[in-house]
Every structure is written in C-alpha cells, then in structure tokens.
Image: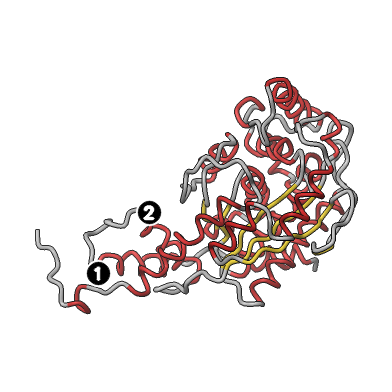
Amino acid sequence: MSILDDCLAAITPVDEQARAAAEARQLSLTKPPGALGELEVIGNQLAAIAGQCPPPVPEPAKVFVFAGDHGVQEHWVSPWPQEVTLQMAANIAGGGAGISVLARSAGVEVEVVDVGMLQPVEQTTDRRIAAGTADMLHGPAMSREQALAAIEVGITCARQAVADGHRALIPGEVGIGNTTVAATLVCAFTGASAEQVTGRGAGANDEVFARKQALVARAVQHHGLADGSGPQDPIGALAAVGGFEHAAMVGLILGAAEARVPLLLDGAIACSAALVALALAPDAKGYLVGGHEGAEPSIRHVLDAIGLRPVAQLGLRLGEGTGAVLAQPIVVSAARVLLEMATFDDAGVTEEHL
C-alpha cells in the first residue's frame, strides 16, 4: 500500500458526539449562551476533531512553507522574476520574511521545504521532485508520479510534525506564478470561470492581470477541465494544472486529518489544495479551519464552496501561511475557553432564568 493509500484509509469523520458534548459545555460556562460567537463554534469543532471535550489546546503549531517554481511563469503571469522564489525561500528560512516575523510572534515553528524550486537553497529541507513544473499550456504541469510524490512529501511532513508533538498544522508556500496555478485548480474543481477566481496575486498590473486571466481560461480548456470535472480524477487534474507546492499542501491536509489535528487554511494556494484533498477524502473537511479571507477572490470562492467561515478578514495577499498563523492564537483561545472557563456551578454564579 502506498503512503497516500495508507493515509486515505486512516481518515475518519470527526466525532459528532464530542462536538455535542462541547456544545452542551458551552451552555454551562459563565457567559450568556452564544456570547463568544464564532469562538464557541471553533472550540466545538476542536472537540470534534480530537474526539474529546474539552479538547486539547492545539499548540504548538507548525507551518510548512512548501517552495516550488512553475513553468507557466514563462508567460509572465507574475510581474516578479522567477529567481524571487529562491530568494524568498532563503529569506523565510533565514527568519526575515513576513511569515518568519508573524510565526515568531505567535510561537509557531516554520520549516521551508523545497519540493520543486529551480535550484536548491541552503537552510531549506530538500524534498525536490524536479526543477520546477512544466508549462501547463503545452502539456501536464507534472506527471502523475510526480504529483503523487509531492502529495506524499506533505503526508510525511504532517506525520513527522505530529510525532514531534505539534498539535496544529499550517500550510504555507512560496513560488512565483503560484496564484495562477491556484486559480486554474479552483476552476477545474468548481467549474468557476477564470474571471471569477483569478486575482492580481503579487501585484499584477492591468496588462499582466488580463494575460493571467486568459491563461487560466486556456489551461482549463486545454486539459478538458472547464466544466469542473476535476473531482472525477483528482490526481490527474492536479498533475495537469497544479504545482509541487500545491500537491504537498494536499498531502499536509490529508496528513492532518489522518492524525486528527486541526489544519488552518491560509490563502489562495492552500484553499485550492483543499479542493483536491477533499475530492480525495471528503471526511477531511471536518479537520479544516478557515484561517482567513484575503484579497484573492479564489479564497472566498473556495471557503463558500466547502462551507468554511474565515477566522480573520485582514485583506492579506502575501501567502506564505501568514493569515493562518495570525488566526492560530484565536484557535488556541477557543480551546482554552472550553478547558479553563468556569461553569456556573464551579463559580457559584446564578444561571439565567426565563
């Protein structure tokens, strides 16, 4: 049995009895019913994920920044040159990037994993499948074997992190051109149009943005995915139009579900990967927390499609895992409410009477 098959076989639905127990406990805590709003919903979900109430506090957390390059950048779908992928991977690993700063602030560990950059970079974990993907307009971006290998990188990362004691996982990424790939995946898995889900990514001007939208539409047509037929063969669709970092994120999501730990989705790249993961394992949905809604339109499209509400709405468009890392302390607080807040009986507080 392959690593992927073994992982898929181990994924089970979240525990609805534990969620019901959490909902009941919320009513006994020293607050008006529903007074903590979405924090209560998140806490109840954490109980369902762990299968116990109160749930364990989901920390420490770890963000894996998967790095890869993309053949579609030959068409300049991003205004940034491709060598920026290498430079930013080194910057993140060296502690100087946005995700590095925010992760330190939140107490989250960061690991940069090279799954397909054009060249290796020191300080990153080498799990390279190839030196970048192929141009998805001329053929599949990856072979099926490459896509499977990248998914298994993500599963292995999840398993190791949980074995090391991490209790929440966050998928991050770096790769020039990857929002174009993400938009193409969202089209392929939802049937949305390129105009609906393609954003400006890392600051595309009007000319680059128009070219990007056109290339997304061409790619889904070229691979016969314009009708949203990707879920019929999720691996095939991922190989056709995906990226190495997208595939690794698919594996991280599946690995989190296998281990019954929450996974906080970040931006457009992670959301597109979630569509692939849920096509492979629908029960993995219960383990996903919508970290944030950023500026890319595909994020809202995916969150709506899979029924998740974002923890934060900050208009971010950086990627790297930043939005999910910012949401992590809120998710931790949701667990602590169920674990540490006094009940009416404990505190000797009179409950409301209608």
Amino acid marked by disc 2: Glu
Q: Which residue is outermost to the front?
A: 96
Q: Earlier in the sequence, mark 2 or mark 1?
A: 1
Q: In this view, does 208 lie to the left or right of 105?
A: right
- How far across and down, in percent of the image, does residue 31 sit? 23, 63
Q: Mark 1 points at which residue?
A: 28
Q: In this view, does 150 lie above or below 15?
A: above
Of the 4 image quadrants, the one containing the C terminus is bottom left
The residue positioned 44% from the left and 68% from the top of the image is: 47
* 321 left or right of 177 in image: left
Query: Which residue is found at the position 86% from the left and 32% from the top?
Result: 74
Q: Kindly state the secondary structure of the residue where label 2 is placed.
A: helix
Q: Residue 6 carries which label?
A: none
Considering depth in this image, is 235 or 322 the residue closer to the camera? Answer: 322
Mark 2 sits on what residue? 38
Which quadrant of the figure has residue 161? bottom right
Position of residue 203 in the picture relative to residue 13 (left or right): right
- Which quadrant of the structure image shows residue 92? bottom right
Q: What amino acid type is highlighted by mark number 1?
A: Ser
The relative height of residue 239 versus residue 260 in the rendered view (above or below) is above
Q: Residue furthest bottom?
A: 346
Q: Which of marks 2 and 1 is in front?
A: 2
Above or below for 268 versus 165:
above
Q: How far apart are marks 2 and 1 (CA)?
A: 17 Å
Q: Which quadrant, please, contains the N terminus?
A: bottom right
Give the x, y percent position of residue 11. 62, 65
- In this view, the residue farthest toward the left is 354
| Discs 2, 1 touching: Cβ within 8 Å | no
